[in-house]
Amino acid sequence: MYEIRIHSRGGQGGVTAARLLALAAFRDGKYATACPFYGAERRGAPVVSFVRIDDLPIKVYSQIRSPDMVVVLDASVMDTVDVLQGLKPGGTVVINSEKPHEFPGFASYNVDLTGIALAENLAIAGTPIVNTPFLGAAAKLGIVSVDSAKQAIREMFSDERNVKVAEAAYEEMVI
Amino acid sequence: MLTIATGNKAVAAAVKEAKPAVVAAYPITPQTEIIEQIANYVATKELDTEYIPVESEHSAMAACIGAAAAGVRTFTATSSHGLLYMHEMVHWAAGARLPIVMANVNRSLGPGWNIWAEHTDAFSQRDTGWLQVFVGTVQEAYDATLMAFRIAEDERVVLPVMVNLDGFSLSHIMQSLETVEIGDFIPPHHLTHALDVNNPMGYGPMTGPKDYFRFRWDIERSIRDARTVIQETEEEFARRFGRKYGPTEDYRCEDAEVVVVSVGTLGKEAEVAVDVLRKEGVKAGSMRLRWFRPFPDLDLKGREVVVIDRDYSFGFGGVVAASIRAKTGVECYNVIAGLGGQEVTYDDIAEFVRTRRIGEEMWFGVSE
Amino acid sequence: MRERLALSKPTRGACGFTGTWREFRPVVDREKCNQCGICQIHCPDGVIDEELNIDLDFCKGCGVCANVCPKKAIAMVREEK
Amino acid sequence: MSTISEIPKEEYLKPCTAACAGCSSSLCLRYVLKAAGPDTVLVIPACCTSVIQGMYPNTAFNVPVYNIAFAAAAACASGMSRAFRSQGKKTNVIAYAGDGGTIDIGIQALSGAFERGTDFLYICYDNEAYGNTGMQRSGATPLGALTTTTPVGKTEFKKDLDAIVAAHNPPYMATASSAYPLDLYKKVKKALSIPGPKFIHIMAPCPPGWRYDSDRTIEIGKLAVKTGMWVLWEREYGKVTVSGPSKTAMKKPQPIDEYIKAQGRFKAATPAQIAELQQAVEQNIERIRKEEEGIC
């Protein structure tokens, strides 16, 4: 079972990122669950959501304690949240950032999802959409296939720019 | 069709398939997504229903009662305080013998405010005359909602059915969902005592003790008959759609020496705990209680039983444990866990089994 | 078929012969009565018919008819019990 | 005003209800049902009418009656109306509730049903207390009145239900009185000819509760109108019209003393309270006059 924890801020679409990723994995023919940790979140507050992907049905409902991958959709949450908590040794960190971040013992990747969204003028109520471009990054890392990533985005959003930003993130992220 | 959906969306999708003529509901976290989705179906004309956005849960159930009395299929959804606010009408719906279907997204009760999963809300309605089923997966939320309409409306039952799913841990999780075309699985709605202006009668008037008693007995008789109807419905569902359900979901119970009994999503997590324990050589099994009313016959004789209650009856004990003791005479280790959305992992459940003390009660994370 | 719910049927005398409640009986003086029908309109229980006959099986003896009669043609006479 | 000849002869209350002798509510129901006809369902919350229909297995009411919990009449009627309309039925849905079930415990459901534009008629028969349970104070009980829970007389004014309902701007609302059954008949007829939520507030004197002899039920009701304690009017699509009996009364209302003295429930009312009631009557008349003239 591959377990992913997504850190974001309320209103940034972290929950939707989890749902998109689960849907894409599901379209790859795998079992997947996406599970937001809901509190009384408000816009701007740090939030987490979870994705589990497996070849067998998933019976675990509790929160992910030791993820294989951590996704940080807003680098500023790292100021207050230990995003590496429980991350498996050798695990993966993906950060929405223009610059690389070093985490000894972990594989770290960065991609400017915000910049990609802004280039397409893709924003809701002034907040750049980073979850659909994130799916491109997830595809680049082989978590889901490119085709399923695009299909998942199209199932949830009608605006084709969402696919375009995912493609852009796929191209931009260096692995 | 195979898709991925939250528990809430699955319930709404089942409602769309069952086509109630009236849906009256009031939003409450974490149920809101169900009625938002139904409102969307109505707006996009995917569902032809009279959607009544009422001003309270008391009115939601009252409106369903009025509509059901007029002879149509009705649905509502609620949670927690909403369920408690409609409590009077929950009794009334069963007493009036109206086959209303309601989804209840299980959530704790304030104060303090807490929006996460707990079963005390539903168990506090156990004496209302409603049938109550608890589900463990998104798929089951969908399937149970479909079956609820058929069971409720069966002439041998004619009682309302409450489909319970855990707040957030099931209502908001995304899992795979296979939707079906029900065809004639749910027969056309027909209520023999629907309002008829050509045959005027007084519905539920003042009734003396002798007759009142007789009508109460008829509720009990019907809810006993419901066992047969549930079984037939679940068998027919399996024949048509390939998914089999029963009064409990048993996992590796055949040769189990210790059985974990639980309700809702904890029951799925318990299956993982059983796998862990089996690897350690413990002959463990999991029994997830699906139907709570009518309460099923449980075969627990000669086994050690660990009951996890995500609820509590103050001054008494866990509701499920108390029910099992009363119905089976079997003692158990009663773990109170998961209240207010407390995290309970399969490792925790395995530990409950390893450290079991039959006859005792333990509040997980609170009492040692 | 089982009766699931208390369903009551419209019945004459559903609440018994309410005429027995009466302490005073309305007696119409046909000489004074001008057949205006005001008593019939205002009878709370509708026990006065078109011909202004009072159904004493059900008349509760409230006296409204006597009170509203513009001709004072109805007297309330004590029932002998 | 309607004339006697146009009132249907059909009676939908079989002899006899279990109402108290001289009960104005059963008189009102006679005319409500004459106006509504047989294609009607009554929705009845806990109130005197839950008892006066009779006990299972018999009922004196010859239309379907749906009994429902105290706070739930308007919501139940809401669901019922939508269900009937979805089946293509034009059946009149009439919630018939007392003042307690309307003004106090039922007001949330009433407000919701009116806000949603439910196609139904809500009738509040107002005997200014919880009559069914032996006269406890309600929000409709007037200042100075004795009830079993206001043993020295109520110290607050009656709640202005009509202003609350009017705030929902229903297409039709009216006040009526059991003392003017033909006026009531006409108003129910008109209400049922209009789609959407309609409201009729009937003053319904109660012999045991108001402590007067049962034969005076009509007389007391008329006194209320003649003194201006109760004003008969209609509000159709926002336009207020004072009804016939109140037109005369409003020109030169009788002092309220006669109305007050006729009832035992006011025997503890102080002269100051009676003066306050008189003042309130005058203000109310003035307000309705202005509303009718379109000034406010």
Image (tube, helix red, strand yellow):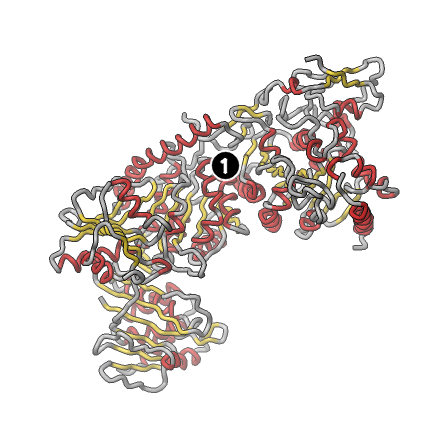
> What residue is shown at x 65% (from left), y 17% (from top)?
C20
- Quick check: can you spot residue D90? no
Q: Is residue A44 above or below residue B187?
A: below
Mark 1 belongs to which subunit?
B
x and y, in percent, of residue C11 in the image = 57, 21
Q: Is residue D238 left or right of residue D12?
A: right
Question: At label 1, which amino acid type do we have?
Answer: Ala
| Residue B139 point in image, percent of width and height | 31, 52
Quadrant in the rendering for residue B220: top left
Which residue is the site of mark 1? B69
Residue B182 in the image, given as x and y percentages of width and height:
35, 44
Between B103 and D138, the one nearer to me in the picture: D138
Q: Is residue B15 above or below residue A103?
A: above
In the depicted view, which residue is nearer to us: D136 or D222? D136
Indicate the position of residue D96 as horizontal and vertical percent values.
62, 37
Res B236 visible: yes
Counting labels gives: 1
Q: Residue at x 15, y 46 (%)?
A: B254
Q: Badge 1: few (under 14), some or many (20 or more) residues near its Cα, within 10 Å?
A: many
